[in-house]
Amino acid sequence: MDRCRHAIARRPGFSGYAPAQSNYPPQLRASDLATHLTITPAPIDRRVLIMPCSFLPDGSGTMVLVTPPRQFVHASALIGGLLIVSTVPLKCQEWEFCKPSLRSQVVRLKPAVAKSLLSRFCISIRDTEDFGLICDTRPLGRAFADIVDNQFHPKGVNFGHFLESGGEGAAISGWSTEGHGNHFGGTLLLTRDNGKWKPVWYKSGLITRFCEKAKRADGRELLVCEFEDGGMGHRYHTLYGVDLRRPLAEIALADADSFESNFCNAQRQIMEAVTWGIDHRSFSVVIRTPEWYRLPEVSCGPHPPKRPRASVRLEFDVTDDGLRPRRSAPKTEQVCSSTVNRVSDHLQPPSTPSI
């Protein structure tokens, strides 16, 4: 989502506002900002760094702009977005449009716990008011190539048996200056070896901020995770599975997609709470579409989209081969007649669609 898109701040030396969006966390010279925004600044040679929303497991976070220690210019970030110019933390919220469907087992990472877990990954860890925990990372090779500028910001931890049924693992959610393309974060995996935590890899774009564990028959655990995102007028609530043995092979499970226009119709979808079976070996989720209507006087082309079912239950099993959809056909839930009428193909949109 454009989670911090409403935040606008004034920077001394500029004759106007420099609006901003958290989708693009680049580093820019003040003069570059002025050039691309056609703003005339006073003489400024400081460089500024725009950081993305840094989310905590409870959904809160901050977005700040500081002077970085190193010089790096990336001026293309203004394309399609706005840019904040501020040195004051701005409050952000992960769950702005959606309600979480999982009871996340991710625990907020406290400084003392972080230092214990990350002693072989971080040269030093400091707790800051603006950014929370900052880890200056050790050079550990290609498995950690996604770390930017030798810094990692750990936020939450989820302990489990991720690689072996008898092994101990820790999935550390956080960020290293990722942008929207990598969902503003990544995951650091640790395993416990002879009583000490050992870093295995860091993957940008692997988001484990809100997850529950699912147990296979052999005792090894997978993750069922969620996040909200958006772009081009769409707002997504996404549910997906993660096997930390294969971190790049995320398992798409369900999406709730809300939008005010795709040039043909509009819709609002809601993902209900995930319901778990015995021992977390199976689960289901309901996707509802309480609003759907065609837009007036538009061309939908030769194959216009069809109205989705008012309510669909998706069921999954936790198997030794991973998370698998149940083979039975999706079950359509019973809904009241007013809801059915609301999503009629012929229903005209309200004067101001509420999406």
Image (cartoon, rainbow, N blue to C red):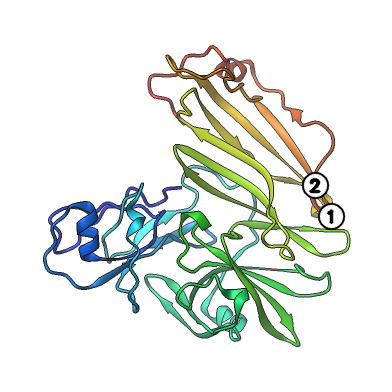
SS of the residue at dot 1? loop
Report the disc number at residue 324.
2
Locate residue 126: give its quadrant: bottom left
Identify the residue shown where x is 44% and y is 17%: 298
91 left or right of 203? left
Q: Compared to 258, does 124 lie above or below?
A: below
Residue 202: x and y in percent read 60, 71
Query: Mark 2: which amino acid?
Result: Arg
Disc 1 + disc 2, Cβ < 8 Å: yes
Direction from residue 148 to residue 100 in the image, left or right? right
Crowding at dot 1, Cα within 10 Å, few <14 / some 14-19 / many 20+, comes out as few
Q: Which residue is labeled 1 in the image?
A: 321
Comparing 270 with 152, the one in front is: 152
Amino acid type shown at disc 1: Asp
User: Residue placed at 83% from the left, 73% from the top?
Assistant: 166
Could you say where residue 134 lies in the image, as x and y percent from the top left? 46, 76
Q: CA distance from mark 1 to mark 2?
A: 8 Å
- Count residues near mark 2 (Cα–Cα under 10 Å), then give few for <14, some for 14-19, many for 20+: some
The residue sitting at 84% across, 34% down in the picture is 328
- Residue 165, given in percent of the width and then of the height, sits at 83, 69
Give 90 or 123, whichever is nearer the viewer: 123
Please state the horizontal and vertical placement of residue 349, each as a whole percent of the image: 45, 18
